[in-house]
Image: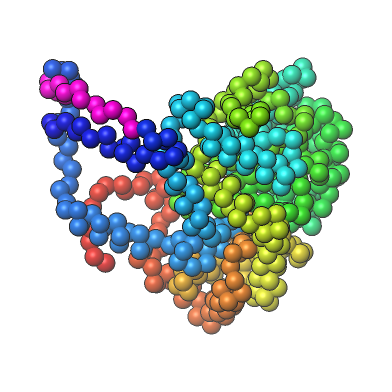
């Protein structure tokens, strides 16, 4: 085996690495047989032999079959598929950020610590909370962190409590989180307005309730108009209120969730504050708390004194560490860049446009698609399928037909309480031309449902793959390598 004596990784010395390059490793390699007994050695794997050109073509072809926000409109409700400005990736790619190692001494990562500290301060200003941690790696992870803090609070009070109340419109991660934290999830129904039924809530609230998990605006895209009263009712029995703020676009610069009485909130930095996340890429789930829960935040936080930043581990009531090191740091760089690029005014405009765009779609499509809750919506609009039902045509068919019109399908069959749900979130980054083209497509599809329903049932006809058996694809995935093949 050839010994590489070049210090490959570290030759890109930069201010972030303070010009250091590590000495080359000149220890000669031992023959494998002398360190690894034969019965531990692997046989040669039957890996395919392909040329570099074949590999490049294979992956280029695959990438072209994929659909992303950079191809066209991606109206996936509850996912906030907004455009990710390239400057975010330029910032995240700076060697001073991307080449640091989590075990470096604090004195050598002052810039990174300053960014974490600065982003926390920006998020606190946007949300109104007393403190926050950027450690959770995703929205669901933020929920876990937040509910663990609620539990720590009740345990500290000497009454652990057993129940977590969650609306029937909630994202599935909410009851899953409650269960993972040892709580029994209790469902509270939605009223005819699509928000929490206050009478039903009053019946459920007692001293065994640890908290409520609410989404504001909720998953129907509606603002919870009774939120202040709901928080008051919960606090009256000693329960705390968790806010799922995965999609906070609508409130940006207009409402601080802390001011509504919500005790703890998670944000999906990878939704509201950009970062590519289609296909399950890395996320970041900032968790924000008021004074009641502040002592329980995960360690470490970043503290600052006289312009010097340091990890703060000395927090005796902390729930501990919930991620190795400090979460997905480069996503934090992207979120910081995004917020600083827009500024306070731009952040508010983003929120305003997210709401305006969703309502524009709602008004233009209401003639063809049914509205279960006919109210002004926030960042997204949920239709209950086609207004004029067509024989055998379902929302799934409408979604599949969107592909033939060049659009990513919208979210369907969620929230569960809306029959034939079609959930559209335009985000603020789409212009009117794009929205109008999409509206024309959806109106044409509604027309086709009446005149030529087979076009919907056979859709998509233009995609590399037609309809998949999604259950089998998930349960029995065929992950074998196959030679590249031209379609
Ligand atoms: C996306 C989303 C989540 C989960 O976030 P992940 O980052 O996918 O874990 C939770 N709640 C709501 C309302 C969401 O839209």
Position of residue 24 relative to residue 354, above or below, is: above
Please say whether residue 481 is visible from this viewpoint.
yes
149 lies left or right of 433: right
Please say whether residue 171 is visible from this viewpoint.
no
Question: How many numbered dots are placed on residues in this image?
Answer: 0
| Residue 281, horizontal then vertical, whole percent | 46, 47
Quarter assignment of residue 264: top right
Whether the magenta-drawn stretch holds residue 22 is answered as: yes
Position of residue 345 relative to residue 288, above or below, is: below
| Residue 72, horizontal then vertical, whole percent | 49, 68
For the C terminus, the image quarter is bottom left
Quarter assignment of residue 9: top left
| Residue 12, horizontal then vertical, whole percent | 34, 41
| Residue 90, horizontal then vertical, whole percent | 46, 52
| Magenta segment | 21-33
237 lies left or right of 368: right
Position of residue 7 relative to residue 476, above or below, is: above
What residue is rendered at 19% in x and 33% in y? 4
Residue reaching furthest bottom? 451
6 lies left or right of 323: left
What residue is rendered at 49% in x and 49% in y? 91
What residue is rendered at 82% in x and 29% in y? 238
């Amino acid at each position: 085996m050839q010994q590489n004596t070049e210090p490959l990784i570290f030759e890109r010395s930069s201010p972030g690495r303070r010009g250091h390059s590590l000495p080359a490793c000149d220890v000669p390699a031992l023959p494998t047989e002398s360190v690894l007994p034969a019965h531990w050695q692997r046989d040669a794997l039957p890996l395919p032999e392909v040329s570099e050109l074949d590999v490049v073509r294979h992956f280029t072809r695959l990438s072209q079959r994929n659909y992303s926000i950079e191809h066209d409109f991606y109206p996936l409700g509850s996912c906030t598929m907004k455009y990710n400005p390239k400057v975010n990736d330029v910032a995240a790619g700076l060697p001073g950020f991307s080449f640091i190692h989590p075990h470096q001494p604090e004195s050598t990562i002052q810039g990174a610590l300053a960014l974490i500290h600065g982003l926390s301060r920006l998020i606190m200003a946007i949300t109104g909370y007393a403190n926050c941690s950027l450690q959770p790696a995703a929205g669901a992870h933020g929920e876990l962190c937040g509910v663990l803090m609620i539990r720590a609070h009740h345990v500290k009070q000497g009454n652990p409590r057993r129940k977590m109340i969650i609306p029937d419109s909630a994202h599935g991660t909410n009851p899953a989180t409650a269960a993972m934290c040892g709580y029994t999830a209790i469902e509270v129904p939605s009223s005819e307005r699509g928000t929490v039924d206050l009478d039903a809530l009053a019946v459920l609230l007692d001293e065994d309730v640890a908290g409520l998990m609410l989404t504001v605006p909720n998953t129907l895209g509606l603002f919870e108009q009774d939120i202040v009263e709901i928080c008051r009712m919960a606090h009256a029995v000693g329960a705390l209120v968790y806010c799922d703020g995965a999609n906070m676009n609508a409130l940006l610069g207009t409402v601080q969730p802390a001011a509504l009485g919500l005790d703890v909130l998670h944000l999906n930095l990878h939704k509201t504050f950009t970062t590519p996340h289609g296909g399950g890429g890395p996320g970041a789930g900032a968790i924000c708390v008021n004074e009641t829960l502040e002592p329980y935040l995960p360690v470490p936080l970043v503290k600052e004194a006289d312009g010097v930043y340091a990890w703060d581990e000395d927090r005796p009531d902390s729930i501990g560490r919930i991620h190795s090191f400090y979460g997905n740091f480069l996503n934090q760089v992207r979120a910081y860049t995004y917020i600083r690029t827009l500024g306070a005014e731009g952040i508010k405009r983003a929120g305003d446009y997210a709401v305006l765009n969703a309502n524009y779609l709602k008004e233009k499509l209401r003639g063809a698609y049914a509205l279960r809750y006919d109210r002004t919506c926030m960042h997204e609009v949920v239709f209950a399928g086609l207004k004029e039902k067509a024989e055998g045509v379902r929302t799934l068919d409408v979604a599949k037909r969107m592909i033939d019109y060049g659009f990513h399908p919208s979210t369907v069959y969620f929230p569960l309480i809306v029959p034939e749900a079609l959930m559209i979130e335009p985000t603020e980054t789409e212009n009117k031309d794009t929205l109008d083209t999409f509206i024309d497509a959806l109106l044409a599809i509604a027309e086709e449902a009446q005149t030529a329903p087979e076009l919907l049932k056979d859709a998509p006809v233009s995609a590399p793959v037609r309809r998949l058996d999604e259950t089998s694809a998930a349960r029995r995935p065929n992950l074998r390598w196959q030679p590249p093949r031209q379609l």
